[in-house]
Each structure stands twice: as C-alpha cells, then as structure tokens.
Image (cartoon, coloured by chain):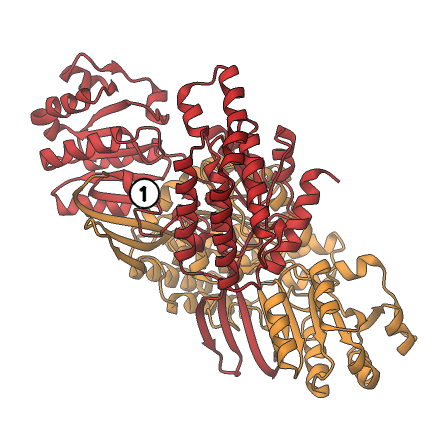
Chain colours: A red, B orange
Amino acid sequence: MSELKIKAKKASECARELATKTTTEKNEALEAIAQQLLQEEEYLLTENEKDIQIARNNGTNEGIIDRLTLTSTRLKDMAEGIRQVISLTDPVGERLASIERPNGLQIQKVRVPLGVIGMIYEARPNVTIDASSLCLKAGNAVLLRGSSSAIHSNTALVNVVQRALEKTTIPVEAIQLIEDTSRATATEMFTLNEYLDVLIPRGGASLIQSVVKNASVPVLETGVGNCHLYIDHNADTNMAISVAVNAKTQRPSVCNAVETILINSNWATDHFDSLLQALSDKNVAFVGDEKTRSFDSRIEAAQEVDWADEFLDLKVALKVVDSLDEAIEHIHQYGTKHSEAIISEDAENVENFLNKVDAAAVYHNASTRFTDGFEFGFGAEIGISTQKLHARGPMGLEALTSTKYIVHGTGQVKG
Amino acid sequence: MSELKIKAKKASECARELATKTTTEKNEALEAIAQQLLQEEEYLLTENEKDIQIARNNGTNEGIIDRLTLTSTRLKDMAEGIRQVISLTDPVGERLASIERPNGLQIQKVRVPLGVIGMIYEARPNVTIDASSLCLKAGNAVLLRGSSSAIHSNTALVNVVQRALEKTTIPVEAIQLIEDTSRATATEMFTLNEYLDVLIPRGGASLIQSVVKNASVPVLETGVGNCHLYIDHNADTNMAISVAVNAKTQRPSVCNAVETILINSNWATDHFDSLLQALSDKNVAFVGDEKTRSFDSRIEAAQEVDWADEFLDLKVALKVVDSLDEAIEHIHQYGTKHSEAIISEDAENVENFLNKVDAAAVYHNASTRFTDGFEFGFGAEIGISTQKLHARGPMGLEALTSTKYIVHGTGQVKG
C-alpha cells in the first residue's frame, strides 16, 4: 500500500470517530493546536528556513519566497486564526428541516461532516493550518498534499499539530500530510473515491483545471476569476474611478481583482481620460480595443487572449461598449462566473445586470474585491467556489458539511 | 460540430433566457406540455409500438418491455405528474440569506437555476417527461440522452414537448433529445464542461459508475443502494418481521429495497424461524453466514459478493451479529450510504445507530422503502443522491438550483 492509501484509510476511520465528537472536544483540540504552534516556534522557523534556503538556491523570486516565509508574527497570526475558528458556530448537528408525514414518520434533516477532505495546494504553508482548523471544526478528517517547495515547513507544522492532538480526545490521524509530493501522489488522490469524499484544490489555474479534468472524487472548484467591472452610461464619475482603481490595484494578484473594465461609450466620452489617469497613477498597464485606443495612444492593442486571461498583475484590459447588453454578452463570453460588478445610477440596467449576469457574486456600486469569506461575515473561508454545485462563492464551515435524513417511525411499512 | 455540441450550445443560450422567466411563464409551458401529451396520444403510442416491436424481436424480457410500454393510462399519469410539478413552489428567486455588513454592503443570497442539465438514462420513457418538467420548473435547460431501446418513444415525446413549447414564451430548445444514442455521444457529454453544468445519470450501477469515473462535468450520483436492516436484541417481533418483509418484497427491483438483514443473536434465538417463514411465504430466496445456516438448512452459503451486491430481486442475504457495533461495521464495509434501518426498543442503541451509520437516510422502526421524494413530501424527485456534495437523499426541485450572491453598495472599496 502506498503512503497515500495507508493515510487515506486511517483518515477514513478517523472521520467516523470525528463525526461523533462534541463541539467542546473539537474546540479544545483547536486551542491545543494554537498553543503548540506558539510553543514550538523555534522548531517551526528552523524547518521553514530549510525551504527558504532551497528556494533561494533555485533562484525563486522574492514574492514567492515571501509567501513561503514563516515569522514569529505569522505564527501568532495563525494561532489567532485558529482561535477565530473556535469562536465560529459548529455547523454539525444543525437541524435544517423537520417534517412530519401523514403516516406518522418524523423526518429530520441534519448537518453532518463531509467525511474525508483532500486538500491539494501550492506554496503557502499557512494553508496547512487554515484548512486543517476549518476541516476539524466541521468534524472532517483532512489529507493535506502541499507542494514540494514547502515540504519542510508543512511537515513541521503537521508534526506540531499532531503533537497537540495527542493531548486531546481527537485522533491524531484527523490531520495528516502526504509527504510524497510527486505528481503521481496527486494523481492517485484524484481517483481515491474509496476513501475521499471531496477534493479541494487551491492554487493556480493549471492546478485547478488538472484536478477538475482528472478527478473522479467530487471536486470543490475554487478560485479562478476573470472578473469584470462595467461602468454604465450614467455612473457616478468619482465612484466609478474609485471602484475601478480599488478592484484593479488594491491587490492585483488575487482572484477577485478586476481584469477587464467595460466602459459605456456615453460615459467614456466625458470621463475616459480621468479613469485612465487614475489607473496610470497606480502604474497600471493597458490593453484595449480600437475605440479605447482612439481615446489614448498609451493603450496597446488587446489580443483575444487578453480578454480571457487573469493577468493577476497591474495590467487591465479596456473595452468601450455601446450598451448594457453588449457588456453582458462580453462577460458571458469571457467571464469565469466569479465576481462581476456594475457601477450605475440606472435602476433598470442595474436590475438587468444583477439578474442576467451568471456569477457567484454580482455587485452594484461596489468593488469585486469583497468576494471573500471574511468580508461576507463568515469568519473564515476554505476557498471561493466558482462551480454551481454544493457551494458557490466564499465557502465557510457549512460548505464542509453534508446532510443526513434521520427518520423515526413506529413500524411504518410502504403500502 | 456534432449533434451534441450544437444542441448543447443552444441549451446554454436557452438557459440564460430561462433564468429570467417568471413562475407563471414556466407553469403555462408545463400545462401546455401536459395538454399536448394527451392530444397526441395516437402518435405517441404508434411510435412507442416501434420500440416494443424491436425489443420483442431482440428477445427482450417482459419486465423491461413493460417498463418501455406507453399506454393511454400511463400518458394520463405523465400529464398528472406534470400538473403536480406545476403545483410545487418555484425555488428560483428564493432569498436564502440577507446580510448587512458594518461597511454598509447589503448581501443577499438567492436561489438561481443550475443552468444546463445533462440527463443520461436507461429504458423508461417516463423519465423523459419527469426530468424535463422538473428541470423546466427550476429554470434549467435539459439535454436528454436516453437509451437506443427507447429512441422512437423518446423522440416522439420530445417532439410533442417542443410542439407545446412553440405555443409558449419558453424557448423550444429548453428541452432537447440527443438522437445519436451511440456510446460516443455519452462519452462526449462527460467532458462538455463548456456547456453543461451538471450530469445526472439514472440507471444501473454500471452506467452510474461509468459517469462518475469518467466525467469532468460535475455529477449528481444517484441510485445505487445496498441497503441493510438491522434487527436489534429487543426488537418488537411483529414489527421487525413486517418491516423486513416490506423492505425486501414490496418492490425488490428498486434502490431503497433491503438487500441484507443483520440479526442480533439474542433476537435470532427466539424469532429467526418466524422471520424466515414470513420471507419464504413471499418467495424470497436466502443466502447467509454460517450461523444463519445452522438455524435453517434452506439458506445457501453467502459468497463475499453477496454482501456487496444489489440483488434487486426476491433474494436476501442474512447474517447473525453479536452486537450493534458488529452491525455498524458490516454496514460501513458493504453499504452504499443510501438507506439503513434499525428495528429496536433500546434507546441507546437507536441513538448510536442513527448517529454512527453514514447514509443519506437512516431509519428507526420503519422500512427503508420510504427514501423517496414523494414519501418525504417533496412532491417529486429527480433521483436519490448517494453522494455527499450538493444534495443527499431524495432530490426535489431545490437540488436543481444553485445560489448567487447579489451585493448592493454605495461605492464601497476594500481598505
């Protein structure tokens, strides 16, 4: 048996035990993990340093090294994150419906854990702790498969987690790391339907697409966002510019940042220059269609791929449209159904946009950057679902649960 | 472009239009379909007769021919089924949550249609109408891919449906049949993520497993049920026997029928003979473990495969167990997480069984045969989900919807 299968089998056994644990038991385990993380700072930073050294030797860029790096402050933030999860309501056991049938059957629909969750993720070691604490709170066992570039950090983190769990009533194998980071292990996870209830990939578009295409285990697809901002004919000028700048530049590397701005031709006539200047002041580079280029020669001609790609950078695609319908059609053609916004004072257009654009989150007069579990008030998030089944948009603890019908009878048989 | 891709693209366009249709428009279309089915009885029965003739020529067994056969009464039942769907509450537009954030953002979570649903199903032509009416009511377009053995019936039914839709505001391509019933078409559907939002397979275990294993489009897995009845040490004798007979024999060919009965050794000592006699009176054949065979020599030795298979027939596997835990372990090892029942007067055992057995529906003192959308009061069902994501157990209209966050702001940007 491979490392993966041995650990998956253990996780599956643990999941049955976890499903019967009380909220108090789970919270005590989470608190033990938070404390252990702080106690073992020296060990964690030493192991993390090994990953950083390897990354430097490989000429990894500073942005990625920064994401990989653990510090005393970041460990405190992780512990704080765990304590926030402790403060969240336990979804398990929640009664979602209570039905009494004419034949006397009493049917209850209750929330139960999903079972075993496989996380496949890249680079950042904080995902190891974030995902583990959310999975545990919702009563699930988790199999973590991080990237080779963070293997020392992830191994150390899971060692610390397991040393904490040893002091609690939660089984140690509730949280396990797959130490073999070869591609073959990930591929093996894709089809491990016998033990895994769901796979959650977190990382770049190619990782996520590979999981979606190849997994027979059900997948919660997260994260790819080619988001649009549509500035309508009578949009408030300052609001439109302020939201455009925020949605593009506040943090360009994330999935809810805007990649294309669609501008109504009437609005563009008077305000295009101001919009461009405001974005230019933030060092944004431009590609655009013919009309936008007639407004400003700094705009390079957009290629087909520019409408479809996530730049994840200080770069934006601009297009002038003649109507709301043209904007909606463009979004339908190129969007990834993540987050889409309209800035408008035209109530009918707003209504049409919000109803007709098919996305996890649609915004009126606000930045797309708010699509986030914390900003929505969920207290935490395991990712942002861009699929339509099970969960859509920011996923909190509830997305890590399933349901079960519990039926009480007095000997009823079907006639 | 293949027939499938052309129709899938049309379905995708229709889905956007359907999402904005009112409940009245959808109900009027459903009523038009019901009337058209009754008006075109002669055409439908003539076309159905072609499938029946081919089936007879192929030596198909009478059970399958019966399921394939349309009659005047069955058409009236179909029309009646559609009218029941009309009477159901439209789930689209339902507000599931309303959140006001400290920054003033107003977030609403609302139900929206899933989009385009691909149904892959076997034999029974009534699925063509059942699935179409449920998908339409929930605002979805549907692509139907039935089996070649029902191709004349399915083609005629969809022709009738489309002639009805022509008289309404609902686009005709909201309901389309894939006429090419080759295996290649089904395989092409598996990976048509560009146009399909979900696949729902309905049929035998091999069809369902083929879809689950090979589809990259998200799947709603339905139907395979290796269900158990556990008779506890102090179970009411008459109740245990009556539920066992009902769960096994009332309709043995369906997924919520019981395949294995686990009998506590204490109960078995006094009542095994009565149980066996009652089942034997209904012509049930037996396989069992050593202990059951020591009770009655009519029981054949169970092979490993007998614990795992759905017999879907008047045949049951019997096993004597010494404890509740042994019963739960057996169910964990062989069950398909569909429906599981305990007959017991021991409150602690009941509680443990209902909590620890992981299944879509768990029963205390009632027959597993109640796992069904009609019996649960949903008014209709598209299938019984045996997966944990999105929907579990009987799936009504809500399972055919997704959600969307609609966010209203006043120019909020992320700080």
Query: For the residue marked with disc 1, what is the amino acid?
Result: Thr
Question: Foreground residue, A196 or B161?
Answer: A196
Disc 1 designates what residue?
A371
Image height check: is B34 above or below B296? above
Residue B252 versus residue B200 in the image, above or below: below
Q: Residue B203 lies in what quarter of the image?
A: bottom right
Percent position (x, y) of residue B406? 27, 49
Does residue A314 appear to the left or right of B253 in the view shown?
left
**Residue A189 place in picture, x, y as percent:** 62, 39
Q: Position of residue A92 (x, y in %)?
A: 49, 62
Q: Is residue A68 left or right of residue B334?
A: left
Decide: is B271 above or below A234.
below
Question: Which residue shows up at 69% across the image and 38% down it?
Answer: A3
Can residue A384 be seen from the camera position used here? yes
Q: Nearer the viewer, residue A409 or B138?
A: A409
In the image as oriented, which residue stretches furthest toward the top? Answer: A297
Q: Is residue B296 visible?
A: no
Q: Chain of mark 1?
A: A
Horizontal and vertical percent position of residue A223: 41, 37
Residue A405 drawn above or below residue A231: below
Q: The C terminus of chain B appears in which quarter of the rendering? A: top left
Residue situated in front as seen by the camera: A23 or B332: A23
The residue shown at (53%, 68%) is: A405
For label 1, count other residues whose C-alpha is less than 10 Å away and answer few (under 14), some (14-19) or many (20+). many
Dot 1 falls on a residue whose secondary structure is loop
Name the residue: 70% across, 68% down: B228
Q: In which quarter of the view is residue A386 placed? A: top left
Which residue, as the protein is rendered here, is positioned at the far left? A270
Name the one closer to the observer, B243 or A179.
A179
